[in-house]
Image (cartoon, rainbow, N blue to C red):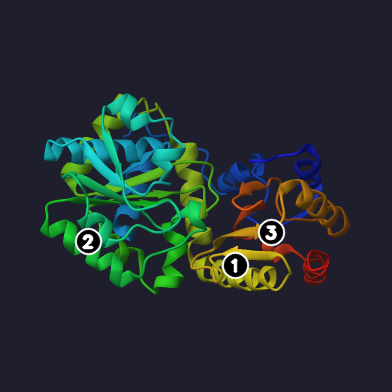
């Protein structure tokens, strides 16, 4: 990944951004706490109304029996996979080659849990039911990420998910959902979170990605599963004396943005269409299936950086502060659409694509 000072600095100076919800600064926490009673009691080591009420609220929303709040999704998912491995007496689990656990967690499952991940399919495409059927060894659990971020946020069809779920249940394989961006896929599927989560034995969701909270995650499942997850939360050091700043912000931004996912999805499709109309630019997928997609340029990063920096300076609209090298002497960046794009004056957005299309 390239992250030149010119591109990064030009991006930071822009007043408007294509991606996310706005600056991640102290105002995010201040806004969430504006209407909070100063006498609100904090949670203490996982107990108390502030954490218990939120856990119950999200468990019901996801259609699961119970839920546990974790400070991070990394911690939550490692706990989930270990629980299913112990249940089956089998430390082999399976997931996509570009799963977060495989490429962003420093081999934590192997180093901390002595678990053996098996990779399903190939990096450039979604995993399939045939990949699962062709596993060389029995596994205790399969993790599926919806959407698959590292390949542009692609999704299997809902019918394919149903087939995978049915196969796993008939073969005694637990199915876990990496739902870091679960909220964002409901407009494409035209299904509720409950309907999607019903296909999985356990579910992780994030409160800072599509929703824009400070941090934090929920792990949901049946009562036995979540009871064991609390043990692993303590073992991992996640049972902080108080988590209420994360919970208050998660609750606030959940209520504020959960109803906007269709709006973000429509904006993502509109933006992708405009990128694809520019020579030498394409998106993956061509038509987004959530609020996120990747923008690819048919030039190396050193050629694209000055173009984007010039656009930033002339329009005051930030496209990206980085470029990632891609095969074939190309480069690209990721966009996740939130509230910020709606703040861009239409004439400035038009100017971005006029300059990009030259």
Residue 197, by quadrant, is: bottom left
Element carrying mark 2? helix
What is the number of the mark on residue 165?
2
Q: Residue at x 83, y 57 (%)?
A: 311
**Where on the picture, by quarter, is residue 116?**
top left
Q: Which mark is residue 268?
A: 1
Residue farthest to the right, as pictured: 314
- Specify whether 193 is left or right of 4: left
Q: Secondary structure at mark 3?
A: loop
Question: Which residue corresponds to the image point at 78% horizontal and 71% vertical from the top-left?
Answer: 346
Q: CA distance from mark 3 to mark 1?
A: 21 Å
Asked whether the beta carbons under mark 3 and mark 2 sit within 8 Å of each other, the answer is no
**Left or right: where 345 falls relative to 223:** right
Above or below for 313 versus 245: below
Placement of the N terminus among the 4 image quadrants: top right
Point 43% across, 47% down: residue = 98
* Residue 83: image tag: none
Q: Nearer the viewer, residue 77 or 49?
A: 77
Q: How many C-alpha atoms fall within 10 Å of the one at disc 2: few (<14), some, or many (≥20)?
A: many
Q: Which residue is mark 3?
A: 298
> Foreground residue, 23 or 248?
23
Quadrant of the image containing the C terminus: bottom right
Mark 3 packing: few (<14 Cα in 10 Å), some, or many (20+)?
some
Q: Count of labels shown?
A: 3
Residue 14 seen in the current view? yes
Position of residue 10 relative to residue 198, above or below, is above
| Disc 3 from disc 2: Cα separation | 38 Å
Mark 1 surroundings: few (<14), some (14-19) or many (≥20) residues within 10 A:
many
């Amino acid at each position: 990944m390239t992250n030149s000072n010119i591109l990064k600095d030009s991006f930071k100076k822009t007043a408007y951004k294509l991606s996310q919800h706005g600056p991640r600064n102290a105002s995010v926490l201040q806004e969430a706490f504006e209407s909070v009673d100063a006498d609100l009691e904090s949670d203490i080591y996982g107990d108390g109304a502030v954490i218990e009420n939120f856990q119950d609220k999200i468990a019901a929303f996801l259609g699961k029996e119970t839920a546990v709040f974790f400070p991070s999704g990394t911690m939550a998912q490692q706990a989930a996979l270990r629980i299913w491995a112990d249940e089956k007496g089998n430390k082999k689990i399976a997931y996509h080659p570009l799963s977060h656990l495989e490429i962003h967690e420093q081999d934590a499952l192997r180093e901390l849990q002595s678990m053996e991940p098996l990779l399903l399919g190939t990096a450039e495409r979604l995993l399939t039911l045939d990949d699962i059927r062709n596993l060389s060894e029995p596994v205790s659990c399969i993790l599926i990420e919806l959407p698959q971020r590292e390949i542009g946020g692609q999704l299997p069809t809902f019918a394919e998910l149903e087939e995978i779920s049915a196969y796993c249940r008939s073969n005694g394989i637990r199915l876990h959902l990496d739902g870091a961006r679960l909220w964002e896929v409901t407009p494409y599927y035209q299904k509720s979170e409950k309907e999607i989560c019903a296909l999985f034995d356990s579910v992780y969701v994030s409160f800072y990605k599509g929703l824009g909270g400070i941090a934090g995650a929920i792990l949901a499942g049946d009562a036995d599963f979540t009871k064991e997850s609390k043990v692993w939360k303590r073992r991992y050091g996640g049972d902080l004396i108080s988590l209420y700043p994360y919970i208050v912000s998660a609750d606030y931004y959940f209520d504020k943005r959960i109803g906007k996912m269709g709006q973000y999805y429509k904006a993502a499709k509109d933006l992708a269409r405009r990128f694809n109309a520019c020579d030498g630019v394409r998106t993956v997928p061509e038509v987004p299936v959530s609020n996120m997609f990747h923008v690819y340029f048919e030039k190396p990063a050193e050629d694209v950086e000055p173009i984007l920096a010039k656009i930033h300076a002339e329009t005051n609209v930030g496209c990206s502060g980085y470029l990632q090298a891609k095969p074939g002497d190309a480069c690209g960046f990721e966009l996740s659409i939130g509230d910020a794009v709606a703040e861009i004056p239409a004439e400035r957005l038009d100017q971005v694509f006029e300059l990009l299309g030259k």
